[in-house]
Amino acid sequence: MRKILLFLTLLLSQLIARCQVDQLVRFNSNQSLTVQELLDRLVFEEVPLIFSPTTLPSNTLEITRGEYTVSELLNRLKIYSIRYQLSNDAILLSIDRTRPVNRNISGFVRDAETGEALIGATIKINDGKHGVITNSYGFYSITFRPGQHRLTISFLGYPDLVDTVSLVKNIKKNYSIKSQPTELDELVIEYSDGYYNINSLIPGEKFLDYQQKGQVPYFLGEVDVLQKSLLLPGIRTLGEDASGINVRGGDIDQNLLLLDEAVIYNPNHFYGLISVFNPEAINRVKIMKGFIPPTYGGRASSVITVHQKDGNRNKFGVSGGVGLVSARLMIEGPMKKGKNSFLLSGRQSLYDLSLDGLNNNILRRSGTSFQDVNMKLNWDLGRRNSLFVSGYLGSDRNRTGFDAIRRWGNRTLSVRWNHSFGKRLFSNYSLIFSDYTYRITDPVEAGSFIGKSNIIDYSLKLNHQFFQNVHSKFDFGSDFIFHRLKPGDRIPFDENSSSTNPLFLDIEHGLEWGLYASHEFDFNHKLKALYGIRYSGQLFFGPGDIFIYDDSMSRSPNSIIDTLKFKPKEVIDSFHGLEPRISINWRFTNAKSIKMSYNRINQYVHLISNTASPAPTDIWKLSNRYVEPIKTNHYSLGLYQNFSENMWETSLEVYYKDMKNLLEYKDDADLFFNAHPETELISGEGRAYGVEYYMERTKGLLKGWFSYTLSRSERKANGEFPEEVINDGKYYPDDHDKTHDISLVGIYEFSDRLSFSASFNYSSGRPLTFPTGKYEINGTIVPYFEGRNQNRLTDYHRLDISAKWSPERKKERKLNLSNSYWTFTLYNVYARRNAYSYFFRQSETNPELTEVIRYSIFGTIIPAVTYNFKF
Amino acid sequence: MRKLYLLGLLCFLHCEDPIDIDLPGNPNLVVIEGWITDKPGPQVISITRTNGFSSKESNPKIDDASVRVFDQNGGDFIYTNIGNGIYVSESGFTGSYNELYDLRVILSNGDTIISSSEMLMEVSDIDSLGYDSFITQDEENPRLEIEVYYPIAIIKDPMDEVNFYKWKIFRNDTLFSDPAAIILQEDRFVNGNVLPNQFTDFDFSEFDTIGVEVQSISQQTYDYFRLFKSQVISLGTSSGSAPASLTGNLRNISNPGEKVLGFFAATSIKSGEQVIIP
């Protein structure tokens, strides 16, 4: 009987428990509850639960309005490893102590309208500190504990997208976000996420972006990547007429300029006033100057990656513009809707441009024109693969004197294949062709000739990213560049030319290689680090001749004592070296961090140029025993802080950089068609150090920034022989050393259709050598110089303003030119005659006397107007 | 119209203004300029000193040095000072072809300055001197088309020698004296050929007399003038190279640390003349 009673009781309690499990619980509104809150609610509903509150996970569940059975609710806890079992009249909850297997979600983030990959978008998990950033193909991968998570995808110029995912198994998910309705046409420096600058492991990393209503004032209104970069701390140029940029004391050949992974050897059109990057075709530009991750190598000072737009995947579009200097047109659209797209863009200078107003004879005046073509195709090949083909074709033509013509240009073609192995391993394989060619034709006798030189690179890059989890990411891979460099061919202009001795300098062959691995991890949200190593080198191989010099005197054509002949593929010289790189970010509060970094970089190609600003016809040279690889060590320490919810971003950085094997030139260096340029070269070293302060207002109607750099950049050449010593072998400031450098930029959004901007630039005058005496030779007064760069020009300052205006939309029109706008620019508003240099010469009016002439490139105010359209 | 405006705009961008910088320093170095030519003497050598760049005075002259030129055959030519830093040889002294010459200067403080040896090589004759022309806009009145003439001088470069040339152009007996008008030429790419030199940067008009002089110079003189031109013409522009102290083939053997500026060169000179008859 007792047994029966016991059985009945058991049965009853089972039934009661069963009843409890089927009991309905009503939620009157959508709620998000923690596990604890949910269970408390069930207890409140008198569900007999037994559990230990201390071991509950802290996850949140989203529960939509409605009625649920207890078992339904409890089943949802399974993803947190919480299981229930019925026991007597209670429901016993137990937590599976075995660690849950992390799950992965990966995919791409794209623009909803155009399908353009969004590079550097942030994806945050549960609004916390965990987050990842999309790579340069818009790919992300997150490995996280199972459960329901809230993902917030943010990208500048786009509203945040919030998505809740149930991470119970691995997921592939692509996000398309819709941009806010702004005109997307200008490059503006911004970060994708309010804390990006605090969080990034690359101190001094900047994105130049296409996203804002206003724009900074540009010379002649031509939107330009490199011009804009000069408004950032630590980036400088010699002067207006100078080509290339100097980053933290580096030479202009020390910047790795990548256009869709292909190296651009000469980024200039039109005397360096306009860069080759056609803004119409550019998606995003990233500048790394404080730290260069091991993925990149081969240039000692900075990396500037320029990503071309993919082209709109959903609809056809045309955009373009006309300015005083050039006209641009871009066509984009899908080849198969939503799957792939193309982009084709061209730019053409409108006139034969000239900066040489002094020569009145029209036939002898120099003239310059240029063209660009950018192309990109991309295909989505299933979920795991995508393919990109991009190309660039640039050409410049410059006529000087009497029909002497120089043409030069970069050509690149890159084929890239993205593949994801599983969920966490993203790979990119690239095959790249890059070519820089110049050609000179001079028909004037005697010695009329055609000169040609080029550098061709065939590269293979194998890059992998392994997203271990949200705390840890690995990068590894390798790259190989086969250089084929033709230093110069000089052939007769035509059959009547007196230049019957053609010259074909030895072609240089080199294989530059690099292997790298790095690890980026996040330790308890406070400490992040990226550390790794790059092992790089170059084989310089035959066929070719190497001259052996008498080492008791400075190298000259007369000191050649022997010539070594090398057969094809025979290694002539080989260099290699380890390049450790480390960057640490300690984020001690949410909006404040300290970054420390160190990198070493070796550079195996050199631009040979002894003019103040390199000419397009200067040659490149591979490292050999006489021109050893450049080696730099760069240390940087920065404090980053944001204020008022990231409205203000500030940073203060100090750096020190030392550089070995920099090139200097002997006094009378003749580098043109020279079979042994090493006889004209001096090996020097350099050091650069400074403090950079940057403050930016990122929100509101008035945006802009202030940047201040206090720096010093010095050179030293102290060779064995008197010809190889500059300035008595002591350190001297290099040509682009500017002690103080200030930029102030403001962009004010007056209304949706009208914005104004202004930029002010101040810098100390650059060093110059003043004569210490004069004398007369051949009836001409000659200045006498000793020492180098011991004096300075007067300070440089300039104000530019611009306005951007979109005319009112006219809806009834067939062509919707809603995105068209005008820009009006005034360059050098107060018409300051900034000195580019001084001339020390015989007076033109009185030949008995001397005069000092301040030479300015732009001595006046320069207005410009451009019209841009998009439909 | 717009095009003209734009060209006008871009053309008047560069500007040059005189500014006032006082540069009083003076390294006080000796400067020698000396040529031995194949023209009948006397041969001339000048000796001066540097002074401050801003100095309004002309360079100090050295009139108390002893100046001698030696050849390989024991020839010893004594120069006499005629004031103003100028020293002249006896009138009979004319340079001989394929002869090596050396300069020796002894200053009043006893310092001895010597040159490296200079070979006097005969320069080829100007085989023919002609001209060609092109049509361009008149500078004052751009609507007017004018014909501009330029000289063409033909010489034959010797096959078995390395030759360097320096040219001078005269218009109606007036030398184009601007440093940019110094024309230097090497035969590296044109060795042994007939050289039809087109001097397209020199403008002539109808009935002008073209005068052309060609000189043979040594490689060191060629290098000196190449650097001289770059220092005097392009320094300070973006295509200019770094400032250099411009030293030639002279050195102070008593005081090797003391630089001697200038050069000593041997040269052969040939000339031609032609009137432009349309």
Image (cartoon, coloured by chain):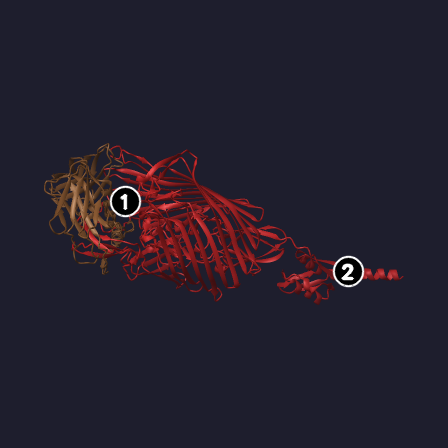
- Cβ–Cβ under 8 Å for marks 2 and 1: no
The percent coordinates of residue A786 (x first, y second) are 27, 54
Mark 1 chain: A
Q: CA distance from mark 2 to mark 1?
A: 94 Å
The chain in brown: B
Q: Residues within 10 Å of mark 2 (few under 14, many from 20)?
A: some
* Residue at screen point 28% across, 42% down: A405
**Residue A177 in view, yes or no:** yes
Mark 2 falls within which chain? A
Q: Position of residue A68 (x, y in %)?
A: 68, 60
Which residue ends up furthest to the right in the rendered image? A1
Q: Quick check: A352 above or below B198?
A: below
Q: Which residue is mark 1?
A: A399
Q: Secondary structure at mark 1?
A: strand
In screen coordinates, is A524 left or right of A248? Answer: right
Q: What's the residue type where badge 2 is placed?
A: Ser
Q: Nearer the viewer, residue B94 or A160?
A: B94
Q: Which residue is mark 2?
A: A87
Chain A image colour:
red
- Measuring from the top left, give residue B257's x and y in whole percent: 27, 51
Label 1 CA crowd tier, 10 Å (few <14, some 14–19, many 20+): many
Quadrant of the frame with the N terminus of chain A: bottom right
Type of residue at label 1?
Answer: Arg
Nearer the camera: disc 2 or disc 1: 1
